[in-house]
């Protein structure tokens, strides 16, 4: 099995060293580069063809969110997965991270096994946050006065929604509700395989990297409105 190629992006050299030791101690992954800011992270993502980037959300110059948007917007880097790292575990940063194209979010205080598991989950193309968790954090974020999306993004997503079939839109609404493929299949009286096909097609048409991003897009576009308890 080919080891997972990990890129470390953090302005603290000591923290990068600690992460390198941890990652390189595992047989199924290794560090292919270190970046001290977001611009360097984007450059190294291209040159190393990293599978996963551990990206600090706050760095001088080009920050982690901007770098994540740049990587996500580059078709040549479509296979790169990004795990955001921060000491500030607040809903606003999580929503912004997912909106930027990250596969998930992890506090710097996470246990070593959590970090290693996050790398493996992201490398496998899965979201670190479940659709249920994503739905919940977006609702909390909006309840605190946050914005569901930036105007240009919302308009772009709404335009992309027009490319979805009626059934794909139905499935997207169900995904945004935090339901699994099996649950959606029961609700729409179709097979789980059919649901999976619709989900994959919706992801391709909307440019979503995983199910958690589908949830974000559903809210960003206005297709779904969160219930504020």
Image (spheres, rainbow, N blue to C red):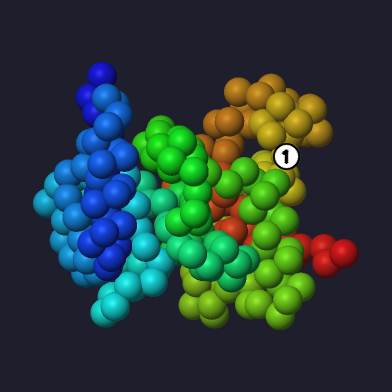
Name the one closer to the observer, 180 or 66.
Answer: 66
Label 1 neighbour load within 10 Å: few <14, some 14-19, many 20+: some
Residue shown at 64%/46% (left/top)? 131
Q: Which quadrant holds the N terminus?
A: top left
Q: Is residue 162 left or right of residue 136?
A: left
Name the one closer to the observer, 53 or 47.
Answer: 53
Give the quarter of the image for residue 141.
Answer: bottom right
Q: Position of residue 78 (x, y in %)?
A: 31, 48
Name the one closer to the observer, 91 or 89.
Answer: 89
Q: Position of residue 116 (x, y in %)?
A: 41, 37
Q: Is residue 220 left or right of residue 170?
A: left
Q: Position of residue 224 (x, y in %)?
A: 72, 60
Residue shown at 49%/77% (left/top)? 152
Judging from the image, what secondary structure is the residue with disc 1 in? loop
Q: Which quadrant holds the C terminus?
A: bottom right
Residue sticking out furthest to the right: 229
Query: Which residue position is annotated with label 1?
Result: 179
């Amino acid at each position: 099995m080919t080891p997972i190629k990990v890129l470390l992006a953090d302005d603290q050299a000591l923290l990068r060293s600690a992460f390198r030791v941890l990652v390189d101690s595992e047989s199924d992954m290794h560090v292919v580069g270190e970046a001290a800011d977001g611009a360097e992270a984007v450059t190294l993502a291209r040159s190393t063809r990293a599978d996963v980037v551990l990206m600090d959300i706050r760095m001088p110059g080009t920050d982690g969110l901007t770098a994540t948007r740049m990587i996500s917007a580059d078709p040549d880097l479509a296979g790169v997965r990004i795990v955001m790292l921060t000491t500030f575990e607040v809903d606003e940063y999580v929503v912004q991270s997912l909106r930027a194209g990250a596969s998930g979010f992890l506090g710097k205080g996470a246990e070593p096994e959590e970090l290693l598991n996050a790398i493996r989950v992201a490398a496998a193309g899965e979201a670190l946050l479940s659709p249920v968790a994503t739905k919940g954090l977006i609702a909390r974020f909006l309840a605190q006065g946050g914005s569901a999306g930036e105007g240009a993004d919302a308009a772009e997503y709404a335009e992309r929604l027009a490319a979805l079939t009626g059934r794909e839109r139905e499935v997207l609404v169900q995904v945004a509700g935090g339901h699994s493929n099996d649950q959606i299949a029961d609700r729409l009286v179709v097979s789980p395989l059919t649901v999976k096909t619709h989900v994959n097609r919706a992801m391709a048409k909307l440019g979503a990297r995983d199910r958690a991003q589908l949830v974000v897009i559903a809210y960003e576009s206005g297709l779904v409105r969160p219930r504020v308890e």
